[in-house]
Amino acid sequence: MSNPETQGLPGRKPWKEPHVFTYILPVADVISIAILALAVYFPRHRRADLTLSFLAINVGVLAVSTALSSASVNAGLGLGLFGVLAIIRLRSSELSQTEVAYYFTALSLGVIGGLGADMGWYAVAMMAAVVVVVAVADSSLLFRGYAHELVVLDRALTDDEELNATLEKLFEARIVAVSRTKLDLINDSCIVDVRYVKAGRK
């Protein structure tokens, strides 16, 4: 009679002693997502709904990817799951580019935590690096004073110089870039996408 520990069941890998990082990485993932969502994202953006979403999607991806790591599936299925979850979440509500970055970071941490046991401490280092990069990029250290707004003006401004002057007066800031997304000559209005830097910044 064959030994089930060496033969294995159909559709599954032969059983073997779990790698020590199979236990370490989930703990590292939970710590990483807690820091990202509760210590970095929420204090800066104050959206409790998205904080919950980041935590839930991370733990869910961690659980599924851990289960996939013990089955006879290839990496393509894991990446497919990553894509499906991303599409479902991103289509459910409008997210800013900053929130999209946090969302994909939460997904990435979950995938690394579930499938990265063979990488050892390198996987832990990648988790830490991802959290640090996002935390720094979303801080005021790099882009202090820079802002972006979508503005509806009650005038159909076709002259670029006049448009820039109007926006500089409105925001009391230096305009970096402006693009018209809609120009309504009938109702005398326009919608502009404006990027500016507050006074005192170069």
Image (cartoon, rainbow, N blue to C red):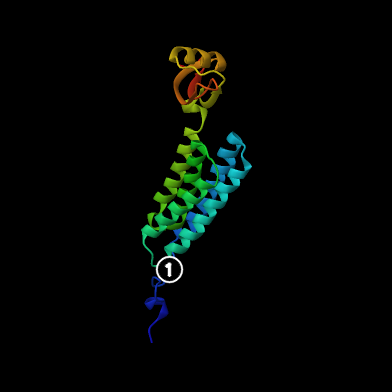
Element under label 1? loop
| Residue 73 higher or lower than 56, as above or below | below
Residue on which disc 1 sits: 17
Q: Nearer the viewer, residue 161 or 82?
A: 161
Q: Does residue 116 appear anywhere in the picture? A: no
- Could you tell me residue 189's position as x and y percent? 54, 22
Extreme residue toward the bottom, this view: 1
Q: What is the number of callouts on the image?
A: 1
Q: Which residue is located at x 42 percent, y 62 percent?
A: 69
Task: Please name whichever residue, 29 or 98, is drawn nearer the observer in this view of the structure.
Answer: 98
**At 41% from the left edge and 57% from the top edge, which residue is drawn?**
78
Residue 155, image quadrant:
top right
Instruction: Give how far across and how far down residue 154 sits, in percent.
Output: 57, 20
Residue 8 location (% of width, % of height)? 40, 76
- The amino acid sitting under disc 1 is Glu
* Residue at the image position 45 percent from the left and 42 percent from the top: 130
| Residue drawn at x 58%, y 34% as measured from the top left | 44
Query: Callout 1: few (<14), some (14-19), or many (20+) C-alpha neighbours within 10 Å?
Result: few
- Residue 11 screen position, x and y as percent: 39, 72
